[in-house]
Amino acid sequence: MFLKLNHQNLEAYKVSKNLLIECYRLCHALPDYEKFAMASQMRRAALSNLLNIAEGASRKSEAEQKDFLK
C-alpha cells in the first residue's frame, strides 16, 4: 500500500492532478502532426506543476514552500 503524504491533501495538488489528467486526454485527441511537439511540451509542463507542489510541501521553511508554489 502507498503512503498518504501531506501534499496529497492540498487543494492545489488535487487541482493540478486533475489538470494533468485532462492534459493527457487533450494530448491524445491532438492531430498526429502535433502529438510529438506540442503534446510533449504540454505533458511536461503539467507534470512539472504537480511535482513542484509535491516537492514544495516537503520543505521545512514556509519561504521555501512558497518558492515552489509560485
Image: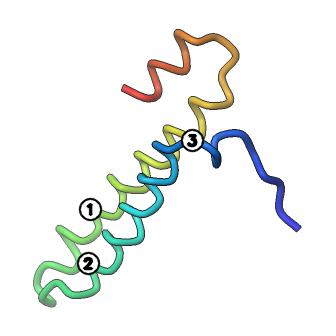
Relative to 9, 45 lies left or right: left
Q: Check disc 3 and report the residue beneath it.
A: 10
Residue type at tag 3: Leu
Relative to 12, 56 lies left or right: right
Which of discs 3 and 1 lies nearer the camera? The answer is: 3
> Who comes first in sequence, dot 3 or dot 1?
3
Give the distance between the C-alpha atoms of the residues marked 1 and 2, in whole angstroms.
8 Å
> Is 11 drawn above or below residue 41 in the view shown?
above
At x 47% / y 19%, what residue is drawn? 66
Relative to 18, 22 lies left or right: left
Badge 3 element: loop
Give the distance between the C-alpha atoms of the residues marked 3 and 1, in whole angstroms.
23 Å
Residue type at tag 1: Met
Q: Residue 59, percent across and down?
A: 65, 22
> Who comes first in sequence, dot 2 or dot 3?
3
Q: Check disc 1 and report the residue beneath it.
A: 42
> Is 53 drawn above or below residue 29 in the view shown?
above
Q: Quarter of the image containing the C terminus?
A: top left
Give the distance between the C-alpha atoms of the residues marked 2 and 3, in whole angstroms.
26 Å
Mark carried by residue 27: 2
Q: Are marks 1 and 2 in contact (CB under 8 Å)?
A: yes
- Crowd tier of the residue under label 1, counting other residues whose Cα lies within 10 Å: few below 14, some 14–19, many 20 or above: some
> Is 70 drawn above or below residue 22 in the view shown?
above
- Crowd tier of the residue under label 2, counting other residues whose Cα lies within 10 Å: few below 14, some 14–19, many 20 or above: many
At x 26% / y 62%, what residue is drawn? 42
Badge 2 element: helix
Can you tell which quarter of the image residue 31 is in?
bottom left
